[in-house]
Amino acid sequence: VYYYVIESYMAYYSLEQGTVCQALCGGLRHLIKEYKMMVVQLEELVTAEGMTLQKMWYHIQSSLRVIKSLHELVISAEGLKGGNLISCIMKLLHNTTDKEIADIYNYLFGKTLNLYVEMVSAWIYEGIIH
């Protein structure tokens, strides 16, 4: 369910919802790609070694936390654009105590904030509105 919600968010918000949403979706796409690679590696381990359910559960714990936190982000960010979207990511970043999740939120925050700052700078210094 988490994966499907994240994919649906990226499909809807990556096209016509503004450049900050597009930047967030780009970051999410990168993280989902890493998740898919983990699933493939796990599948190879299962077929090669006959992995037990306990070992598999151990290996997916970190990825499960990540996907769950990304799900929380896209649910919180539903309908938000621009500065409000950046504020939402910042709020989640400040509310987490998990270092790995904080690093992921920080990565996504950086992706969106850098683009936002570039847009505002272009508007202020060059008079260009994107």
Image (cartoon, grey):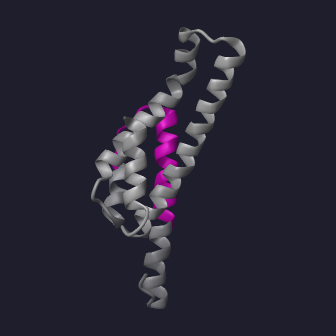
Answer whether residue 108 is magenta in the image.
Answer: yes
Res 84 → quadrant: bottom left
Name the quarter where the N terminus is drawn: top left
Question: On the rendered structure, is 11 left or right of 55?
Answer: left
Q: Nearer the viewer, residue 56 or 118?
A: 56
Which residue in the rendered view is the most extreme toward the right? Answer: 48
Residue 94 seen anywhere in this rendered image of the structure: no
- When the figure is inspected, residue 85 is found, relative to residue 16, above or below; the finding is above
> What residue is shown at x 34% (from left), y 56% (from top)?
87
Name the quarter where the C terminus is drawn: bottom left
Give the x, y percent position of residue 108. Answer: 48, 52
Which residue in the rendered view is the most extreme toward the bottom? Answer: 127
**Which SS type dominates the magenta stretch?**
helix
- When the figure is inspected, residue 34 is found, relative to residue 26, above or below; the finding is above
Give the x, y percent position of residue 40. Answer: 63, 32
Q: Nearer the viewer, residue 60 or 43?
A: 43
> What residue is shown at x 29% (from left), y 60% (from top)?
80
Question: On the rendered structure, is 18 left or right of 121?
Answer: left
Question: On the rendered structure, is 2 left or right of 26?
Answer: left
> What residue is shown at x 37% (from left), y 59% (from top)?
12
Question: On the rendered structure, is 106 left or right of 95?
Answer: right
Answer whether residue 65 is magenta in the image.
Answer: no
Give the x, y percent position of residue 127. Answer: 44, 90
Which residue in the rendered view is the most extreme toward the front? Answer: 47
Start-end of magenta stretch: 91-114
- When the figure is inspected, residue 85 is found, relative to residue 123, above or below; the finding is above
